[in-house]
Amino acid sequence: MNYQTAFYIAITKRVLGWIIFSLALVSTVVSLVLLAEKQGLQGHGLSDVANDFIKIMVDMIRKNTVFLNFFWHNSPITSAHIGFSTANLGFVLLFF
């Protein structure tokens, strides 16, 4: 392998790495937004207002990012109510 071939392989690996990183970052952000919508804040009073605000913001983000529908439908979110399930296992494997 000469220098030019190694250079092109290195550039290809770097570009593929950035593509994989970008997709993982988008998936993580979408999962966190979905988790914030699902869990919300605990308590009453001001927490109710904050929960409404979070739900409105998530709804607005979903409507304005239609091109991310794949991530909105397939990004894993964890649930303490289900216990040990495939969804929670997928979440743990992807994010830890």
Image (tube, grey):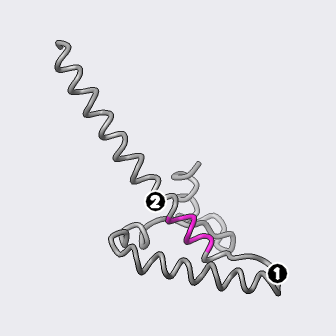
- Relative depth, front residue between 33 and 38: 33
Where is residue 9, by image quadrant? top left
79 over 60 or under it: above or below: above
Query: In the displayed structure, does residue 58 sit left or right of residue 11?
Result: right
Q: Position of residue 96 (x, y in %)?
A: 59, 48
Q: Residues within 10 Å of mark 1 (few under 14, many from 20)?
A: few
The answer to which of marks 1 and 2 sits earlier in the sequence is 2
Residue at 67% over, 75% down: 39
| Quadrant in the picture for the N terminus | top left
Q: Position of residue 13 (x, y in %)?
A: 30, 33
Where is residue 2, by image quadrant? top left
**Decide: marks 1, 2 in contact (CB < 8 A)?**
no
- The residue to which callout 1 is attached is 43
Residue at 35% over, 75% down: 66
Disc 1 residue type? Gly
Residue 27 bears which disc, if any? 2
Q: Is residue 1 magenta?
A: no
Q: Position of residue 67 (x, y in %)?
A: 33, 70
**Residue span colored magenta:** 30-36
Query: In the displayed structure, does residue 8 sit left or right of residue 28?
Result: left
Query: In the displayed structure, does residue 53 sit left or right of residue 20?
Result: right
Q: Secondary structure at mark 1?
A: loop
Disc 2 residue type? Ser
Q: Secondary structure at mark 2?
A: helix
